[in-house]
Image: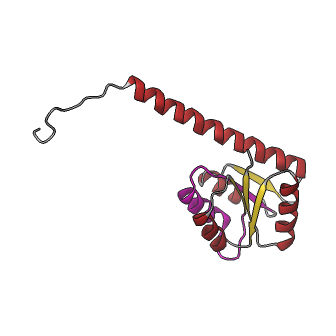
Amino acid sequence: MLTSILVIDDEATIREVLTRVLGDEGYSVEAVENGKNALKICEKQYFDVALIDIQLPDISGTELLTKLKELRPKMVRILITGHPSIENAIAAVNKKCDGYILKPFNIPQLLQTIRRLFEEKTDLYLQMIAEVEKSKNETPTFRYQTPDRW
């Protein structure tokens, strides 16, 4: 299955490198330079994974995490940063970020992290679907003969 990835970074070089590397790995990749464009493209198109720079010109990466979670709850959201700090890491955890990757990238590690997080999230959703189906079969259903009279 082809995985689609959205790269959100204000640095053109980072966008170009990630687009090329991820494209060479068989991923479908789109890249945007700010949060506004990321939200706009996510309203029209579904992405499996978002790589989000923590420092964007129009919105912080942690704020964008929340907005993307509301818009696309199944999307894997990974923060990328060249400015690691305890505050950023805590904010990422508090905003339910799926991953945190430091710049400069170790490409094999980046690819492994994307694959692992995508597989974990997919497995989680498949487990949830199985649980819902199981509960449907095990939960008794009551039908009212005359629902207009309580």
Q: Is residue 55 left or right of residue 132?
A: right
* Depth check, front residue: 96 or 5: 5
Residue 67 is at least partly visible in this image: yes
| Quadrant in the picture for residue 51 | bottom right
Residue lying farthest to the left in this orientation: 149
User: Residues in magenta?
Assistant: 53-81
Residue located at (82% from left, 67% from top): 15
Whether 12 is drawn above or below 64: the answer is below
On the rendered image, what quadrant is the C terminus found in? top left
Residue located at (59% from left, 35% from top): 126
- Does the magenta segment cover residue 26? no
Whether 121 is drawn above or below 106: the answer is above
What x and y, as percent, mark residue 61? 67, 64
Residue located at (25% from left, 29% from top): 142
What x and y, as percent, mark residue 101? 79, 54
Q: How many labels were placed on the picture?
A: 0
Whether 70 is drawn above or below 14: the answer is above
Residue located at (41% from left, 25% from top): 137
- Does the magenta segment cover residue 69? yes
| Quadrant in the picture for residue 23 | bottom right
